[in-house]
Image (tube, rainbow, N blue to C red):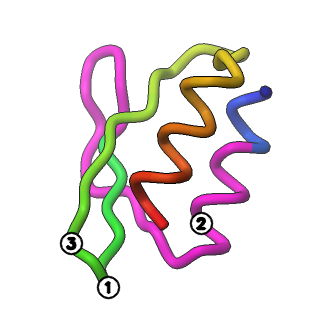
Amino acid sequence: MKRKDLLKIISSNGCTLLRHGSRHDLYINPITGKKQPVPRHKEIDERLAKHIIKELT
């Protein structure tokens, strides 16, 4: 999955960028308070993308 597509999905669910890291960005869901790192690769493995979406929504 492309990183920009993943970011569209999680931002449409209300998640916001918390901070930039060196290799990952940290996103947070303000409703649930859950945080999840998102790698800065152009392509993200489908299983990892599904895990990130599941944790943040």
Residue furthest to the bottom: 31
Q: Position of residue 16 (x, y in %)?
A: 42, 66
Mark 1 sits on what residue?
31
Q: Which mark is residue 33?
A: 3
Measured in 3D between alpha carbons, the distance from the residue under mark 1 to the one under mark 2, in whole angstroms, is 13 Å
> Upstream in the sequence, badge 2 or badge 3?
2
Tell me where the magenta segment starts and ends, as one range. 6-25
Residue holding disc 2? 11
Q: Position of residue 1 (x, y in %)?
A: 78, 27
What amino acid does circle 1 point to?
A: Ile
Q: Is residue 8 left or right of residue 31?
A: right
Q: Amino acid at mark 2?
A: Ser
Residue positioned 65% across, 19% down in the render: 44
Asked whether residue 20 is drawn in magenta, I would say yes
Q: Position of residue 57 (x, y in %)?
A: 48, 67
Q: Residue at x 68, y 44 (%)?
A: 6
Q: Which mark is residue 8?
A: none
Query: Where residue 7 sits: x, y (%)?
Result: 64, 49
Whether residue 13 appears in magenta in the rendering, the answer is yes
Picture residue at 62% right of the left edge, 24% below the top = 47
Give SS at disc 1. Answer: loop
* In-front residue for pair 56/27: 56
Decide if residue 28 is on the left or right side of residue 16.
left
Circles 3 and 1, Cβ within 8 Å, touching? The answer is yes
- Check the image and report above or below for 38 versus 35: above
Secondary element type, mark 3: loop
